[in-house]
Amino acid sequence: MEFQPRNSTEAALHDYKLGLGTFTQKMPDLAHHYNAFTEACFKEGALDQKQKQLIALGISLYSQDEYCIIYHTKGCLDQGASEQEILESVGVAAAFGGGAAMSQAVTLVQECMTELNELKQ
């Protein structure tokens, strides 16, 4: 049965996973090393995983990477970040990234939080 996304956030996450799967098939060694590196970066340490996801979301907003914005908004929610914590991280990113970061925050991040929270219900 073909995957049927329930909203645009779920569709983007699915597209990212498919693309990553294709890349992994074609470049297994590189993908393995990249995945190992990122897993190590997000392991619990002096910063917990929620804090690391909030940082990643801010960097994603600053760099205007829409797939990472979606992925790390989900990561923030999965790690128990509140809407307030996410929005404060967005504010810090906007302080550095200006209008471009803020425009992604008030559109894409808000949409992701709404759609992902609806999926939990």
Image (spheres, rainbow, N blue to C red):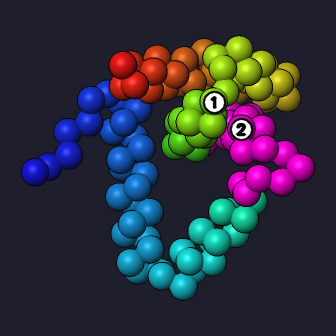
Give the residue type that dot 1 points to: Gly
**Quarter location, residue 43:** bottom right
Query: To which residue does mark 1 refer?
Result: 80
Is residue 77 magenta-colored?
no
- Asked if residue 74 can be seen in this view, the reply is yes
Observer-nearest of 108 and 121: 121
Location of residue 31 in the rendering, given as x and y in whole percent from the top left corner:
54, 75
The residue sitting at 48% across, 82% down in the picture is 28
Task: Give the residues drawn in magenta, as a range.
Answer: 42-65
Residue at 35% x, 58% y: name it.
18
Q: Is residue 19 above or below residue 23?
A: above
| Left or right: 5 in relation to 78 | left
Is the residue 37 above or below the residue 45 in the image? Answer: below
Q: Quadrant of residue 66?
A: top right
In screen coordinates, is 90 left or right of 109? right
How many numbered dots are placed on residues in this image? 2
At numbered mark 2, what does the secondary structure look like: helix, strand or loop? Answer: helix
Residue that badge 2 annotates = 50
Name the residue: 10% across, 51% down. 1
Looking at the image, do the residues carrying marks 1 and 2 touch, with CB atoms under 8 Å apart?
A: yes
Name the residue type under label 2.
Lys
Q: Quadrant of the C terminus?
A: top left
Q: Residues under labels 1 and 2: Cα distance?
A: 7 Å
Q: Please, what secondary structure does the residue beneath circle 1 have?
A: loop
Who comes first in sequence, dot 1 or dot 2?
2
Q: Is residue 53 on the magenta stretch?
A: yes
